[in-house]
Amino acid sequence: MKFRILSAVTLALALCPIKAGQPPSELRFCLRAEPKTFDPLMVEDGNSETIRYLTGGVLIRIDRRTQKLSPELATSWELDRKGDRIVFHLRPNVKFSDGTPFTADDVAFTMKRLMDPATHSPAADPFRSSDAPPRIAVSSPLTVSIAFGAPVAGMERLFDQVAILSARSPRKTAAVLGPYMVAEYKPGSEILLSRNPNYWKVDSKGARLPYIDQVRLDIQQNRDIELVRFRRGELDLINAVDADTFDDLARQVPHSVVDAGASLESEMMWFNQVPNAPLPAYKLAWFKSTAFRRAVSEAINRADICRIVYRGHARPAEGPVSPANQFWFNASLKPHPFDPASARRRLESDGFQFRGGRLFDRDGHQVEFSLVTNAGNHNRERIAAMLQQDLQDVGVRLNVVTLDFPSLIERITKTFNYEACLLGLTNVDLDPSAQMNVWLSSAADHQWNPNQKQPATAWEAEIDKLMRAQAAETDNTVRKRYFDRVQQIASEQAPFLYLVTKNSLTAISPNLQNASPVVLTPQAFWNIEFLRKAPAPEGTR
Amino acid sequence: MRAILHILTRRIGAMLLLLLAGGLLTALMVRFSPGFETDERELDPRLSQSSRLSLEKQRAADGDAANLANRFARMVFHADLGESPSLKRPIGELLRERLPVTAEIMAIGVIGGWTLAFALAMASVLSRRLVVRGLTASSQQVLICLPAAALAIVVFDIGGPVRALVALIICPRVFDFLRNLLHEAYQQPHILAARAKGLGEFAVWAKHVMPYAAPQLFALAATSVSIAFGAAIPVEALCDLPGIGQLAWLAATARDLPLLVVITLLVIAVTQACNMVSDWAALRRVDA
Amino acid sequence: MKRSQLVAALILAALFVWAMASGMSSASPQSRQFRELPDARPSRQFPLGTDDLGRDRLSRVLYATRVSLLLAPAAALMATLLAAVIGGIAGYFGGWWDKCAVAVIDLLLSLPWFFLLLAARALLPLNAPPLASLLVTYGLLSMLGWAGPARVIRAGVRRLRESEFALRARAEGCGSLRLLSRHLIPNLKPVLLAQIWTTIPVFILSEANLGLLGLSAGEPYPTWGGLLRDLQNPLSIRPEAFAPLAVIVIAVACFNLATPRGGLTT
């Protein structure tokens, strides 16, 4: 009897070949550091933002390719003419990853929590146009309105950063609306995201997205290790490749690297113009002189910096806005030319004199100043070394001082014990209202002379007026006129010397389909739900 | 027994005092270092004035003397190591995750380094060929002359085992001592007599050489644990290994006072423990 | 002097003379950027090629050699002097002096020294010459590096304290400090010399490690550690990028071989 049963089972097994389960498709890339939070409302670092992008569902998404607004969880919306109220019409039949239905109550809950001062959400500040809390009204399960105390410039774009939380789910922030959800977290090592079974998006053929089943994010600080792993095929993409390894990688893994053109990142320097800074008065006088600043700018060979430091993967910067910012970039601006002769003429007209190859001011002080920058940034250190040689050619002696970041920040924001500073600029937000704290003379990030009680110069007063005007205006065409003028003044007066705009460089494995890197973050995986892994050839892992 | 307890109590007491002094000095150093009360979030132009003020208040509170004293008391009396302000995670959790990595690197380093050094030292002592002696000595000389950080980069670049790097750092540092010790051991009259009488090399080594050298080897082994711990820091920082060394580097650059104090206390505890073992082993040799 | 010591000393001397002599001829000063020739291969004009900014690598290696061969021995001398004072007092007087010295040594060895360096660099005045940050680095190394030699000197003084000549000196009324400074420490000259020689390569290697971590002199001044950062691009390392490493190995090996072998140990 036993023998018969055994035979039957054996026969059955032989006749029904066991189909080996398909391993889940996996996308693998690196985060440069541990994300500081998984709460989407508390995101303030790039790595946490990656998690938010991959797991969070938003009402409106900025299409990273076209830079235009596209509907996501909101199928449509109406913005009040005054720009202080918005009504969302939500997508029906959407569920959170745990099956909880998505309704207007969730939007209301999220916004209340976002704007609650006790939450201290970094994403809330751009919405705070007044001290009054917003009035949120749910008129139906799929309609919600949010009214702020005062107009919020560029309000719609801000919702790209607000991931909607569930008001009802017991899983709290773990219940998500994005393409993936956090499945496993090994601190210091990796984060595994698995597909959201209830993700609402489908492709043109009605197939549920995302195509790739899971995303594995390795926590890897060292860029060299990341490169080596990519070369070995252990990683599918690198979101930001350094310029000096781009060409080497292109040679070693052909068709894997993409230069998407100018990014939103640039390098710039500025002079300290704070009146009570602990500097000699004669140096302060130099830095306050527009002619001096323009002369220094003209003495800098930006093309060489692009060619040597960035291996051609950068362009001389025109101004505060990169050409990657399609709508807001002032296309009439040109980079300050490299013209040492013109630089000398400007300096001479400003009372400076050349003697024995060195530059002296009208009081006989040799022109020498220090440039602080952050230690450990190899490109910035190289730029500083190149600036030294360029300025030497116009008789200026430049001392480069590299400091660790906290010490640098202390000098440029608190003690103002510095002369010139070289740092990078990343305009994460395309809208000029995100730069209010840079351009307003009373603001803290008005780097060259922050927290002014009254604008120190006429041009700063003009910029203040223009920035406030564009913030109060809802017509983008009018706003662009105002902001174009701000960019023009910045170029003429040169409070910041914009050096180079870096290109967006990514590496994509040839096995990854549908990838089309762009210049806005996240450059390589902005369309992650549409990415697909090519099947591995037979006989390989 | 009483005497041993007395010595142990004194040593532990001294260690506790050292821990206190080390923790206090580190806290003072970090608290009054340039850049302590800054936060890189202040450079984000999207931050409102009230958010900035809130950040400043938070940083000031982190460095407040009463707050520091409170934290220290919690650490001592409740074994609560607190939270890292820069990484926003409990320090205990961070240490629990990273200690195994550092311990693994140190274990591979000490065991691997000693095995290699021992093998080379034995070869050098037992071989009569000048070539062998020359090669072993010069290879160790080259290794000891390489900066640990450069060694880390070279091994990483050639795709070598970065976790075994510490072995290459320890090996040359114990080789000389091992070679001299083994040479001295093999010159002992009783060992010469044993070899002359035809006792096998392995038996000579196991039954006579090793017992002779054991106390000093033990003392040196304890010191090499301390060396391994020190070598792990640049190796982890450069090769991106998520251990205590990398954590220390991150804490220093972020002015993370609580984390840096705890790591300093850990380093003092490990170093002192190694020194105690080393001294005890040295005493055993004197007694022997 | 053994033959190996002589050869090592001669190599060091030759390296030093070459590095000093190269500074006198400014054919290719170490900071000049030949921007049309970045990452150039070795040639007659540039025997070790150029770096990523078109600077002559050989000039930079020789400049860094000059700096290290001057500053490392100076720092080692300072550290050994400090060690002689502290170790001498601890070894001679014993008791609480000894306990305190040992505690301070243990404490120094446990503190996060790289943090001290970060803080010290940040406190430097802005217009201090870049070499100042290098002086601070070596200064800090000497302030921290006396701990190891102090142990050795302490052990030596403890042994000499009970020697016949010391007992006789005390019996004849020689005061403690006089005995220490006029008799014991001078008798430890071979130990002190050995400590200086063994400390120099330790400082050279420490500076190299710090340079690789980015804690070295500011631009445009090269240091051995700073030059080693060229090795950090795993995709395109050139053989000539190993030149600073080779010079470090030669210099350190020569210092190790040339170390006088007499003297006491712990």
Image (cartoon, rainbow, N blue to C red):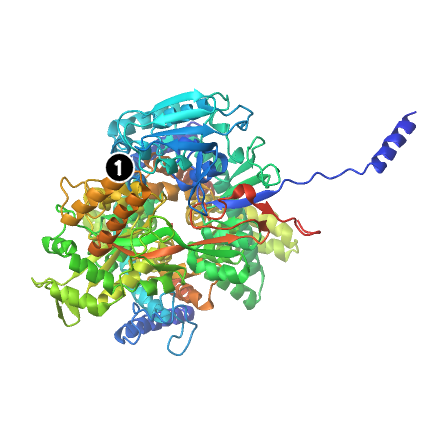
- The correct choice, above or below, for A479 with respect to A171 in the image is below
| Label 1 Cα neighbours within 10 Å, binned few <14 / some 14-19 / many ≥20 | some
Q: In this rendered view, identify the residue nearer to me: A231 or C6.
A: A231
What kind of residue is marked 1?
Ala
- Compared to C144, does B131 lie above or below? below
User: Which residue: 30% across, 63% down?
Assistant: A386
Q: Which residue is mark 1?
A: A472
Q: Quadrant of the N terminus of chain B?
A: top left
Dividing the picture into quarters, in which one does residue B70 lie?
A: top left
Taking the spot 27% from the left edge, 75% from the top edge, the residue there is: C26
Q: Is residue B116 visible?
A: yes
Q: Position of residue C244 (x, y in %)?
A: 39, 65
Element at badge 1?
A: helix
Image location (x, y in percent) of residue B201: 63, 54
Q: Pinpoint the chain carrying mark 1.
A: A
Q: Relative to residue A392, is residue A352 drawn left or right?
A: left
In this view, the residue farthest toward the bottom is C44
Q: Is residue A48 placed above or below A416 in the rendered structure? A: above
Camera-nearest residue between B221 and A248: A248
Foreground residue among C14 and A465 = A465
Locate residue A501 relative to residue A164 in the image: left or right: left
Question: Furthest-left residue in view?
Answer: A363
- On screen, residue B253 versus residue A504, left or right, reads left
Q: Position of residue A453 (x, y in %)?
A: 14, 39
Q: Is residue B181 left or right of residue A264?
A: right
Residue C166 in sight here: no
Q: Count the marks.
A: 1
Residue A97: where, in percent of width, then height? 54, 29
Tell me where residue A276 sits by quadrant.
Answer: top left
Is residue C49 depicted above or below A535 in this figure?
Answer: below
